[in-house]
Amino acid sequence: MCKDAPTDRYHAAIDMATWADTRMINVVGLSEHHGTPDGFLAAPLQLAGMMVARTKRVRISVSALLVPLHDPLRLAEDICLIDQIARGRFSVTCGLGYRELEYQLFNIDWSERGQLFDAKLDVLIRALKGESESTNGHSLHLNPLPVSNINELLMIGGNSKAAALRAARLGLFFCPAIDDDTLVKVYKEACNERGFVISPGEPSTTFISQDPSAAWKAIGEHLMYDARAYAEWQHPNRRAYAESFASNIEELKQEGKYRILSPEEALRSIENTGSLHLAPLTGGVPIDIGWESLRLFEDHVQPYL
């Protein structure tokens, strides 16, 4: 689907983060997947570090980092370095993942993923707190420690009761992938009514265009590709707001999880929901069209906020 060279898209992503740093954008988000035919980002911490180095204000968030696929002590070292440079504007949502293939690629037992996630999270958190960890007969003590407190640096993702209870046990923010009052209740009860939930709030993948109909003709296939790619990763326990069930572009339009809005419509959406999820490189959308969407936000939406 993508005609731009990968190196151009990585540079564009960094340039777009730099652009966001001086506009009314609060968070730049990155995700992690492996073994995809389209080159989905597989090294989000590395890219996050590059973005942090090029920015001064905007928060860089990895959501989600697939903790079971990594050595937790190496994760602690990498996260700490990025947090040192970011000075408190970097965060990670720790996730379990939902693609068995990714576990197979790294020779990790899919059936033990929950227990493995808990074990690695515990090591990661202890290391980030400065506690000594034993590995291969030696002790590792993280130095320097993160600038941020643990509950500012790490959050827990997921869409299940187990995920809600995990977040409560660790005293961390809970970031479910779907708006679900039952999960919120489980989490808050486990926190004795305290705790903080960051819910999606229907975060439709959004582009801005002066002519949405023409834009759908230009990039509809890219958005449809993105929707189908995620649909192929479905499994019975996966629930997420962004999951699309559309089988063609017209259904995708009607579903509303992928949107192309005029600047006026984008402004109304922000006024109604408090946020807007701009995703300028989704599904291999050409770089120049991604920039056009961002500049329309800058010139025709931001001045009215």
Image (spheres, rainbow, N blue to C red):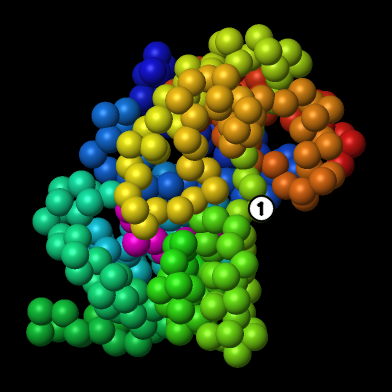
Q: Residue at x 49, y 29 (%)?
A: 246
Q: Is residue 14 above or below residue 119?
A: above
Secondary structure beneath label 1: loop
Q: Position of residue 141 (x, y in %)?
A: 30, 82
Give the quarter of the figure containing the N terminus: top left
- Please provide percent x and percent y for residue 224: 47, 24
Depth check: give the residue in front, 230 or 25: 230
- Main SS, magenta region, reads strand
Residue 186 visible, this angle: yes
**Residue at 49% in and 37% down:** 244
90 falls in the magenta region: yes
Q: Is residue 302 magenta?
A: no
Q: Residues within 10 Å of mark 1 (few under 14, many from 20)?
A: few
Give the percent coordinates (x, y) of residue 159. Answer: 46, 62
- The image shows residue 180 at horizontal and vertical percentages of 58, 62
42 with respect to 201 (left or right): left
Of all residues, the one furthest to the right in this rendering is 304
In the displayed structure image, the side of residue 110 where residue 88 appears, left or right: right
The residue range painted magenta reads 89-98
As displayed, is residue 12 above or below residue 304? Answer: above
Q: Residue at x 63, y 14 (%)?
A: 215
Q: Is residue 297 above or below residue 157?
A: above
The answer to whether residue 85 of the structure is visible from this angle is no
Quarter of the image where one finds residue 304: top right
Outermost residue toward the bottom in this view? 192
> In this figure, which residue is indicated by the disc labeled 1?
201
